[in-house]
Image: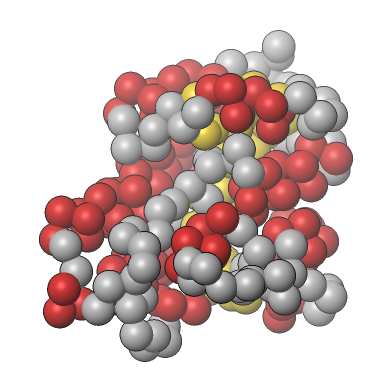
Amino acid sequence: MDAHDTDRRVAVVTGASRGLGLALATGLAQDGWTLVITGRDAATLAEARWPLPGEVVTVAGDVTDPRHRADVAAAVDRFGGADLLVNNAGILGPSPLPPLADYPLGALRDVIEVNVTAPLALTQLLLPGLRSRGGAVVNVTSDASVEAYAGWGGYGLAKAAIDQASRVLAVEEPSVRVWAVDPGDLRTRMHQEAFPGEDISDRPLPESVVPAFLRLLTDRPPSGRLRLSALGVPV
């Protein structure tokens, strides 16, 4: 590996074992990106990595663990830094979704730790390379951060926090694009957990948003919050 290979495009995707993370990692790999992908379960992550083309490094672990984040940063350093960080790993919180009046505060702390603190911490570690390479950060968000849905208070407030963190980071880091990206409702395990026992087969598969995601990386609009469906690509 050549740490000075400026032609190599390096992307980090967290939560890449399944769902949206795996769909985005697959799209990036097929587009020629070198990948560092993470997931909590080593066996599931290895299974997800197996069909991906090109150079893919797997780093299993929990994004809330500082040692795991350091391992991710070390893997990225082997390539001279990252051009793209996709903070996709996240948790919904209790299921069925409880109202805020009954929301367990311990669970709320976990939701904030995974959805807000961990992505910011990983971003901090990778920022030197992102700055030098004119890279980009994608923080996966949700319409629950801007709309008041009953039961979505815990998850929604965490996503509202990462939205604001994205806005502030964009102002502070003008050499880096920072996008808070809402992919819309998708047929994922997390979305099923939000609606236990309900049929969510009418939601589109995660793979459906990959073309819009790749267009985002090509067009490189100014930093900000956006829905993938607004990029002019059918999703």
Residue 134 is left or right of residue 24, and the answer is: left
Q: Is residue 169 above or below residue 24?
A: below
In the displayed orientation, state which residue is furthest to the top: 1
Question: Measuring 16% from the left and 62% from the top, which residue is drawn there?
Answer: 104
- Of residues 74 and 156, which is closer to you in this image? 156
User: Measured from the top left, where is residue 63 in percent x and y?
Assistant: 39, 37
Q: How many marks?
A: 0
User: Measured from the top left, where is residue 197 in percent x and y?
Assistant: 52, 68
Residue 176 visible in the shown view: no
Q: Quadrant of residue 188?
A: bottom right
User: Measured from the top left, where is residue 50 in percent x and y?
Assistant: 76, 24
Q: Is residue 11 above or below residue 222?
A: above
Q: Is residue 207 above or below residue 70?
A: below
In the displayed orientation, state which residue is furthest to the front: 197
- Of residues 172 and 105, which is closer to you in this image? 105
Residue 140 is left or right of residue 228, and the answer is: left
Question: Measuring 64% from the left and 17% from the top, which residue is drawn there?
Answer: 3
- Of residues 75 and 42, which is closer to you in this image? 42
Question: Measuring 15% from the left and 54% from the top, which residue is drawn there?
Answer: 106
Quarter of the figure that contains the N terminus? top right
Q: Is residue 55 above or below residue 205?
A: above
Residue 187 visible in the shown view: yes
Question: Measuring 66% from the left and 64% from the top, which residue is drawn there?
Answer: 187
- Of residues 46 and 194, which is closer to you in this image? 194
Residue 51 is left or right of residue 5, and the answer is: right
